[in-house]
Structure formats: C-alpha cells, structure tokens
Image (tube, rainbow, N blue to C red):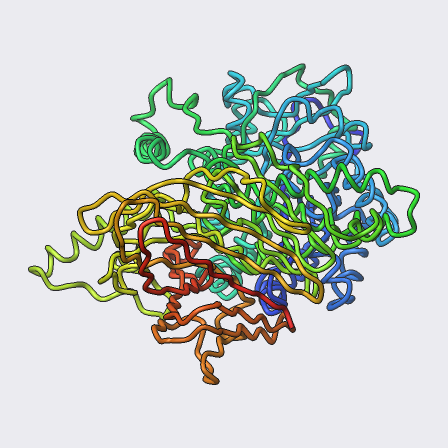
C-alpha cells in the first residue's frame, strides 16, 4: 500500500494463526514445526512482495525460541521489512470470556511486551482465541492497547450484517472503549488450501469488483497448511502453497488487488461504521457447544445450510446459529471444575502481588488458562488426557505456592459452592488437595497430590456425543451391506468402532461406594452395564458431626436391594489427611433392617496416571499394565508412575477382591474417531454379612511414596 491508493482499490489480508497448547507432547511441537511452521514461512520468504498477518501463541513461541532460534531470525527479518504484521493476544491462548478482566488485560499486555522485546515491534491488533466474542470484551482489549481484532462473517450475520456489507472493518465499543473488528470470510476460509489457487484468486478478485474495492480477509490455523490429515502432501509436495503465492503475486502485479497488513489498511481507510455484535463464535463452535439432545437436531440443519448449492440458498440461511460457548462448562463439568478452580486461584493470588513469588504464581495461572483442554470440537480437547493433566499441573503448582504463603497446614473451604448447584468442599493440607461432593455420594472429584503436582483422580466421564450416532449408523449400514457380517474397525490400533462406545451413568470420581449383585462381573461393571443395588453412588450425603480433628465426615441413610428385599442401610464416610502424604478414607456400613443380610460392597477409585505406557499397577508383587483388566484377590495395590515420579500405595483394611479396568472414550479427532485412554478404575470389592443392626467399618489408606 502507498499514498497513491484510491478509495476503489481492492485488498486482500491473508493471515495465519499458529498455536500449540500448554502440555502438548514435545514430539507434536516438533512434528508441527517440520510439517507446517517451517515450510510455510520458508515458502513465504520467497515472495517478499506479499504481505502476511501472523499470530503465534505464547506457548508455541516460547518453544520455538528455545528449540528453533533460526525461525525467530527468519520471522524477525520479515517483520523488519514489513512483509509480516505480527498480531498479539493473550499470552497463553485463553478464551477470554473464561478468565477475569484483570487477567485478560495482563495476559495481553505481557505478551505485547514479550513480542516487543523479541522482535522490536509491538502489535496493534490481536487474534481472539477461537473467536469467542462477547460485547464487553471491547473494553479490556482497548485498555490493553489493542486497536483491532478479527471475527468471522458469521458473527456479523448474527448482528444482521450480510455479506454485501463485509468489505472493510467496523467499530464497536463498550463503556466508550473503542475497538475495530475485521470480518474473516468463511467462503475463503473453507476454500484454502482445498480449492485450486486460481479459483481462490478469482473469487477474491470478483468480490472486489462487486463491492467496488475494499478488503477481503482470510485468517485461519496455519496447521491446516501441512499438519491436518493429508494436507502436507497437498500443500507442499504438490506445491499448492507455492502456486497460490505465485498467483497472488501475479494478481498484485496486475493490479487486481494488493495484499496488506491489517494495521496498514486501517491507517489508510476509515471504519465502515458502528456495530454491536452479539455473543458468538464461528459456526462450527456453535454446533459443538450444543447439549447432546439439541446437537442431534441442530446438526442436520447446519449441514443443510452449509451444503446447500448456490441456487438453493434460502434468504433465512445466513441467520442460523448454534449454541453459546460458555455452555461447554455445562456439557463437560470436568471442564467446569478446572475453570472454577482457576478463577478461585486468580482471585486469591491477587492478595499476594507484593510477594516475590507472585510472578511465578501468575505464570502458572496464565498457563493453566490455555483454552484447548476446556472444550471439545474436532481436535480432542478435554478428552486429551495429557492436556487436562497439564492444566491441573499448572493450577497445582500455583496452589502449592499459595498454600505455603497462606501459612500451610490443613484447610477446609467451600469455594466451589453454588456454581453448579452442588456443595463442593475443598479439603487440603501440605500434601494433598481433595474436592469432595456431598451431593454426589460424598465422592471425590479432585484427588491431587503436591509431590508432583498432579490430580491423580481426573478421569473423564464417558458421555454421549453426536458423532457417536454417526458412527453407529455407519457401522449398521456397513453390516447390512455385508449381509450381516460384522465390519472390522478402521486400520490403526486406536481407531474406534461402535462396540468401543460405552456410557457412564455416574461421574468417574473417587472413593465411590457401590453395592453390587453377588454375580456382577467385572466386564459388566467396566461397561457400566451392571445392576447397582444401592443408592449411594451419586445421591446426597450430609455432614454427621462426628468427625475428629483433621477429619471430614458424611452420612447417608438409604437402601440396598438384597435379592427382592429393599433393605435400609446407613453409610458413613470419613476423610482424614495425615502427615507424610497419607490419606485415610473410612467407610462404615450399618444394616438398618430387621434381618441378617449379605452385601457385596465395593469402593471405586478412578485414577489418572501419566499414560498407560509410563505407569503400572503392582499387585501381589507382579506388574500389571494400566490398560488391562484385572480381577484377583488382594488388599494392597501400588500405582507406580515413572513419568510423574511417584508411587501410590492403596491398602484396604479387609480381605477383598481387586478389580481394575481401563477407561476409554471414543473421541473425534481431525483424522477420524479414536479410542483414547482416560485412566483406570480400581475397586476393592468384598462380601459382607451383617446381622440386623450390625455395622462393619473399612478403611482405604493411600500413601504417596
């Protein structure tokens, strides 16, 4: 762009967003670097007349700076010559409505400072993670020094602005704080890098001609240029990107349109006017945020809208929109638990800003705000166990410092009360942090230890997903097509088929009290397809008031089916945190009926080791893999986790039978449906005969060695 441009000039702003989440495997970082980041920017460097808009998340840029300083040098050169305009954003790619306004401002300001120090240039605009927008964001973004951000054309349609108005940028405000917003065009986003380069160039040119000039924007994940399934061969080996850059350079030389940086365009052209955009994200996110039942109905509608031929498009179609992102926290309450813990820590560490350890706590907090493990779409998200573990690891690192600064020792709080309608009690000392849910069987949803700062009980519930129905339908169709033969699963050891799908009727917490039938089999229990005889798994417990010092106690008077007799039973549960990484969970069962009865109780602990390949169970002196089934007599089990550097001992106070099974979910990834290990269920099960009015007490002692 130059001073001689006219108001009918046509421009194209091409941008890429580069990101890897906190906690992703180093091998994944390296693979993505080799397949996408390095080849894309090396290709771009061969076309110095083209201008590119680039955002790199802080979690990725820190890794690149450490592992590939030559890339920093390459990018710095392109920034210096104005070939690249660098965008800022929250340091660790937080979805902004999920964090506090203070954290929004500080993450953005800190990342702008980091970029200025690294490249000598501060960003004027920012990438909005997952384009999750709420109107109030204009204020903290503007206060952080940001002049603009980008949203999708679907956001603008939600406000009533159709495509014929999207050829520049608009201005919004909140409480008088102004922010400019550029629309990303879905028609370009869906074509790149899939349509032939000449088709994309032709579309950009026609759009400019139809609108009499203006700006077209396409900015999307750079990983689709090399990392996404099958894209490396298409983009680099078959030279799609080189052909596109060549055609783009020619179109620019011919005067069809010019490439531009977003700030540069903003400097030469005024805003197209004021707009207020409702809470929204891109169209796919609206689909994914829907509850299961609504998603089943909404999916076909959205597909019909997206797949309608041009001559079949209806006037109402642009206004179809899906769910609200924050409801991901309702859909996946494991995400909600992380989220509320994060918000609580954000508030609490603010009181220690004068501490020399504040910056360390805040960095752990900000890294824990990385969005990828808080939701699920097409890349695994919350179902990726290592990403969940990384978020909790950062939260616990922060909490461990905070606990020490606050004086240490034993603490009982109700910080989670009221968010989800459940009373959540946090019970911590210097070694452990438990989150107990009296409303859900007095089970433990967080079972964290500070030795390695990991939540060892973070196993996700197996729940219904819309794409499960698609898999079941496809498998049923294949079975009919092959005259009843059962179709084999897709190639690859982790590929999933319909027989791998099971659903849980209760959350996979720990210290869950079960009552089984005499003939319940481990295989049925693992499928969550057994007959639970009691009402203690996820029903209300209350405080009994009998606990001693350093203990919490809970009680429920309920019932257990004993054959055809509905027996009154009382269960009392206690939790005690001792010194030297020792936790004791007690369970007292009383037969309240008027007859002697035989019960088959079990206490289930769901464990989340680092992986099935880096952790093993030790039972009766023998190593057992975490992802195998185990049914044998024992009252002591060890979990040895080499990656976390801990061994946990679980001791049951009576002769029992140990059940272990792996918990898998069938999850959608970019290359298909996969069966992904989430953790292992460990249950101590016994046979118990009680006379009328008689009680039996059992304990499970846990030691982290």
Query: Between 205 and 184, which is closer to the camera in this rendering?
Result: 184
The x and y percentages for residue 393 are 66, 57
In the rendered image, is residue 231 in sight? yes
Q: Is residue 381 left or right of residue 78?
A: left
Looking at the picture, how far across and down is residue 308, in whole percent?
Answer: 32, 31
Q: Is residue 554 above or below residue 388?
A: above
The relative height of residue 455 versus residue 625 in the rendered view (above or below) is: above
- Residue at coordinates 67% horizontally, 62% vertically from top-left? 42
Query: Does 197 sit above or below residue 418?
Result: below
Where is 316 relative to 675, above or below?
A: above
In the image, farthest residue toward the bottom? 621
Find residue 102 and report its horizontal and vertical position in percent: 78, 33
**Quadrant where the C terminus lies?**
bottom right
Figure quadrant of the N terminus: top right
Q: Quadrant of residue 264?
A: top right
Relative placement, left or right, of 131 versus 138 is: left
In terms of depth relative to the viewer, which is nearer, 672 or 554?
Answer: 554
* Residue at the outermost left position: 483
Q: Residue at x 77, y 39 (%)?
A: 348
Residue 361 spot, x, y in % from top left = 80, 50
Note whether residue 250 is visible.
Answer: no
Query: Which residue is found at the position 19% from the left and 51% from the top?
Result: 563
Question: How many marks do you count on the picture?
Answer: 0
Q: Please state which of residues 667 and 19 is positioned toward the viewer in this rendering.
A: 667
């Amino acid at each position: 762009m130059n001073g001689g441009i006219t108001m009918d000039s046509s421009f194209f702003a091409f941008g890429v967003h580069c990101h890897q989440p906190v906690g992703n495997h180093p091998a994944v970082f390296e693979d993505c670097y080799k397949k996408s980041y390095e080849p894309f920017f090396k290709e771009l460097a061969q076309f110095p007349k083209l201008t590119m808009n680039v955002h790199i998340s802080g979690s990725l840029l820190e890794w690149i700076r450490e592992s590939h300083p030559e890339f920093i040098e390459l990018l710095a050169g392109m920034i210096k010559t104005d070939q690249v305009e660098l965008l800022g954003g929250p340091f660790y790619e937080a979805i902004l409505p999920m964090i506090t306004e203070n954290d929004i401002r500080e993450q953005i300001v800190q990342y702008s400072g980091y970029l200025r120090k690294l490249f000598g240039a501060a960003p004027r605009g920012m990438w909005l993670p997952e384009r999750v927008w709420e109107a109030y964001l204009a204020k903290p973004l503007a206060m952080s020094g940001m002049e603009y951000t980008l949203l999708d054309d679907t956001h603008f349609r939600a406000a009533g602005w159709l495509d014929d108005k999207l050829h520049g940028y608009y201005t919004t405000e909140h409480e008088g704080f102004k922010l400019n917003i550029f629309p990303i065009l879905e028609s370009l986003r869906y074509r790149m890098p899939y349509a032939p380069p000449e088709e994309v160039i032709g579309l950009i040119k026609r759009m400019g001609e139809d609108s009499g000039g203006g700006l077209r924007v396409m900015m999307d994940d750079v990983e689709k240029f090399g990392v996404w399934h099958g894209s490396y061969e298409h983009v680099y080996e078959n030279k799609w990107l080189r052909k596109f850059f060549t055609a783009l350079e020619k179109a620019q030389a011919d005067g069809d349109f010019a490439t531009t940086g977003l700030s540069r365009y903003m400097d030469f052209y005024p805003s197209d006017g004021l707009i207020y955009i409702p809470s929204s994200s891109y169209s796919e996110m609206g689909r994914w945020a829907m509850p299961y039942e609504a998603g089943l109905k909404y999916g076909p509608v959205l597909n019909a809208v997206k797949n309608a031929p041009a001559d079949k498009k209806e006037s109402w179609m642009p206004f179809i929109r899906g769910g609200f992102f924050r409801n991901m926290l309702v859909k996946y309450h494991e995400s909600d638990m992380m989220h509320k813990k994060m918000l609580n820590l954000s508030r609490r560490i603010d009181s220690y800003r004068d501490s020399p350890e504040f910056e360390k706590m805040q960095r752990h907090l900000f890294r824990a705000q990385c969005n990828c493990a808080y939701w699920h779409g097409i890349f695994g998200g919350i179902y990726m166990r290592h990403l969940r573990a990384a978020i909790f690891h950062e939260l616990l690192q922060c909490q461990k410092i905070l606990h020490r600064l606050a004086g240490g020792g034993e603490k009982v709080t109700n910080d989670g009360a009221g968010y989800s309608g459940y009373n959540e009690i946090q019970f911590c000392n210097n070694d452990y942090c438990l989150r107990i849910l009296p409303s859900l069987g007095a089970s433990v949803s967080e079972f964290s230890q500070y030795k390695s700062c990991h939540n060892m009980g973070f196993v996700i519930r197996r729940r219904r997903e819309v794409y499960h129905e698609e898999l079941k339908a496809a498998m049923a169709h294949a079975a009919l097509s092959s005259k009843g033969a059962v179709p084999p699963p897709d190639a690859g050891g982790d590929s999933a088929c319909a027989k791998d799908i099971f659903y849980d009727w209760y959350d996979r917490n720990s210290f869950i009290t079960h009552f089984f039938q005499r003939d319940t089999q481990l295989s049925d229990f693992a499928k969550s397809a057994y007959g639970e005889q009691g009402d203690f798994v996820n029903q209300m417990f209350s405080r009994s008031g009998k606990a001693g010092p350093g203990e919490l106690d809970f009680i429920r008077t309920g019932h257990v089916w004993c054959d055809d007799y509905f027996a009154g039973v009382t269960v009392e549960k206690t939790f005690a945190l001792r010194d030297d990484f020792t936790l004791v969970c007690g369970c007292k069962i009383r037969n309240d009926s008027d007859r002697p009865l035989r019960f088959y109780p079990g206490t289930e602990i769901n464990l989340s080791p680092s992986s099935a390949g880096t952790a093993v169970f030790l039972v009766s002196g023998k190593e057992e893999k975490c992802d195998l089934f185990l049914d044998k007599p024992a009252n002591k089990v060890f979990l040895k986790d080499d990656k976390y550097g801990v061994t946990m001992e679980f001791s049951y106070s009576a002769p029992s039978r140990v059940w272990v099974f792996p918990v898998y979910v069938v999850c959608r990834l970019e290359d298909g449906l996969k069966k992904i290990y989430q953790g292992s269920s460990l249950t101590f099960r016994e046979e118990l005969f009680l006379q009328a009015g008689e009680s039996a007490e059992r304990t499970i002692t846990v030691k982290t060695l």
